[in-house]
């Protein structure tokens, strides 16, 4: 092998020299059949090629070409100059095998095992968590195209098991987009009626076919009709106003969702969760969830996965205000860590906010800014349906209070809702004013830089359809990012035995 041609100090040279420390044939032998098939490409070679493809963001066709002609890639893969390359289709098969066996997660985990062996991850860690949009690989469709698309999928999957009458009734919706005046509301309404009628008839017949390949698109067809279509005043079908929270938006990738990273940033696809070590800036875990899922909802699952890795223990988890919910804080505590996240400010349209009241949950009393205390409390629920107590000040007392205009409007007395997480949130609000907490929260920028690195490795856009394969993409990107970071941290220059002893 002409190693002198390999780019010095490059990712390829490091993968050539140290790839065997995170990728071996034995790690992936279970993906291959011992008795069937032709002689195959060794799994370590396949995985190293996939890491190179992730690093360079190449298509399967270009990846195949690079494995045949690129000296850097051949060195990284550990093959000789005479290697004839890997067929594009082989990568698709390898990805499918890795997904089925969760081998992508084990590959990523190997970088953390190496970091533990090298003494980089040790003791109780401070981790940082954040999320980022991943634009989906499927095409976003309107209601008409969604219904047509799922009708086509059901008809294709059911085949001859459908009656001749149903096949004839749905034939018109299995081809190209119909040619009529789409600007005519009456024509659109008539077409929608035909679509819904054909879809409902198809669902009735599909219900009698016990086959997951039929049931899955049929369920999606039913979901789209239920979410997107309603009856108008005349009793005919009409497009529903507004958007259902979990609305299906693509028939080519039904797992895509409308999502928002902020009030002004909307996206269509999935949400990537990333948790990283504040000290080493290694990625500790990644997850891909629905685009419309809340940021905080993914914190505990990802934290538990990280806590399950031998040698990795997270003591403190940093997040932004999206992770500051009381339920999230409680769950993180139960997972063995402390959540440090800024508490959102409380406002009340210019009047005294809740934080201006002294709340004593143990005594069951609330004191207002005027010094009046109430113990009059009734069971109530907040906007999420969580139980709590609502403390009410007497209307007569508030009516004569000199601070009334700054406190409450209307004729009733002021009321304060106190949830079960009040003390936890109050303690977090007090702590965030402390210099130590302020300094800790400033470290959050490290995870933002790490997300930028993952986006540079292709995680702005999903390469594959479906949330699980997008997770595969994220795990490969995280593996590349960690492998490069391990080199910077000197992990490959320290013998594992010596590092453990140290």
Image: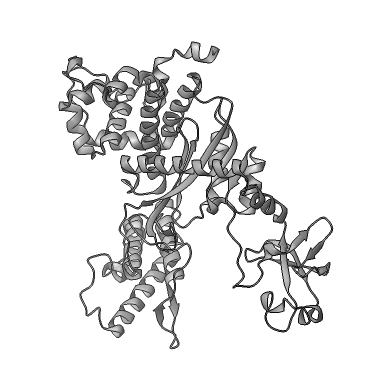
Q: Position of residue 428 (x, y in %)?
A: 65, 49
Q: Position of residue 262 (x, y in %)?
A: 44, 59
* Residue at the bottom extreme of this rendering: 234
| Residue 460 in view, yes or no | yes
Front residue of 356 and 87? 356
Q: What residue do we see at 30% from left, 79% from top?
A: 188
Front residue of 409 and 268? 409
Quarter of the image with the N terminus is top left
Q: Is residue 359 left or right of residue 474?
A: right
Q: Position of residue 65 (x, y in %)?
A: 17, 32
Q: Is residue 404 left or right of residue 216?
A: right
Q: Position of residue 420 (x, y in %)?
A: 72, 56
| Residue 39 in view, yes or no | no
Q: What residue do we see at 27% from left, 67% from top?
A: 171
Residue 150 vertical position relative to residue 190 in the rendered view, above or below: above
Front residue of 262 and 287? 262
Q: Is residue 379 left or right of residue 52?
A: right
Residue 494 vertical position relative to residue 244 in the rendered view, above or below: above
* Residue at the front extreme of this rendering: 402
Residue 312: quarter of image: top right
């Amino acid at each position: 092998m002409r190693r002198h041609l390999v780019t010095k100090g490059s990712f390829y040279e490091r993968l050539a020299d140290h790839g065997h420390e995170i990728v071996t044939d034995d790690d992936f032998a279970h993906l291959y059949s011992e008795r069937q098939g032709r002689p195959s490409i060794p799994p370590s070679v396949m995985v190293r090629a996939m890491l190179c493809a992730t690093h360079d963001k190449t298509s399967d066709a270009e990846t195949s070409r690079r494995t045949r002609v690129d000296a850097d890639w051949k060195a990284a893969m550990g093959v000789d100059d005479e290697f004839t390359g890997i067929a594009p289709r082989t990568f698709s098969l390898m990805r499918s095998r890795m997904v089925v066996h969760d081998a992508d997660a084990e590959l990523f985990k190997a970088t953390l095992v190496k970091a533990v062996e090298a003494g980089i991850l040790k003791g109780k860690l401070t981790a940082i968590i954040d999320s980022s949009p991943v634009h989906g690989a499927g095409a976003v469709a309107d209601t008409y195209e969604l219904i047509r698309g799922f009708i086509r999928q059901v008809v294709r999957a059911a085949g001859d098991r459908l009656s001749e009458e149903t096949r004839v009734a749905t034939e018109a919706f299995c081809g190209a987009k119909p040619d009529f005046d789409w600007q005519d509301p009456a024509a659109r309404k008539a077409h929608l009626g035909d679509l819904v009628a054909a879809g409902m008839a198809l669902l009735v017949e599909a219900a009698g076919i016990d086959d997951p390949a039929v049931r899955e698109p049929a369920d999606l067809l039913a979901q789209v009709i239920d979410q997107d279509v309603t009856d108008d005043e005349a009793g005919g079908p009409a497009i529903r106003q507004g958007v259902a929270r979990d609305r299906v938006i693509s028939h080519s990738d039904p797992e895509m969702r409308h999502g928002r990273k902020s009030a002004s940033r909307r996206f269509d696809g999935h949400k990537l969760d990333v948790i990283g070590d504040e000290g080493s800036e290694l990625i500790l875990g990644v997850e891909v969830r629905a685009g419309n899922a809340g940021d905080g909802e993914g914190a505990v699952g990802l934290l538990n996965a990280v806590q399950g890795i031998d040698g990795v223990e997270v003591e403190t988890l940093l997040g932004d205000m999206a992770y500051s919910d009381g339920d999230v804080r409680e769950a993180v505590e139960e997972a063995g860590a402390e959540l440090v996240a800024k508490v959102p400010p409380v406002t009340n349209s210019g009047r005294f906010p809740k934080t201006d009241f002294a709340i004593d949950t143990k005594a069951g009393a609330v004191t207002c800014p005027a010094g009046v205390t109430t113990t009059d409390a009734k069971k109530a629920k907040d906007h999420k349906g969580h139980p709590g107590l609502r403390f009410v000040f007497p209307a007569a007392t508030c009516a004569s209070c000199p601070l009334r205009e700054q406190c409450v409007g209307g004729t009733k007395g002021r009321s304060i809702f106190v949830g079960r997480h009040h003390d936890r949130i109050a303690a977090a609000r007090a702590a965030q004013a402390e210099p130590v907490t302020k300094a800790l929260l400033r470290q959050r920028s490290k995870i933002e830089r790490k997300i930028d690195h993952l986006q540079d490795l292709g995680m702005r856009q999903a390469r594959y359809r479906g949330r699980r394969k997008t997770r595969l993409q994220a795990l490969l990107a995280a593996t590349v990012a960690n492998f490069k970071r391990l080199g910077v941290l000197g992990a490959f220059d320290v013998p594992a035995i010596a590092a453990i002893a140290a």
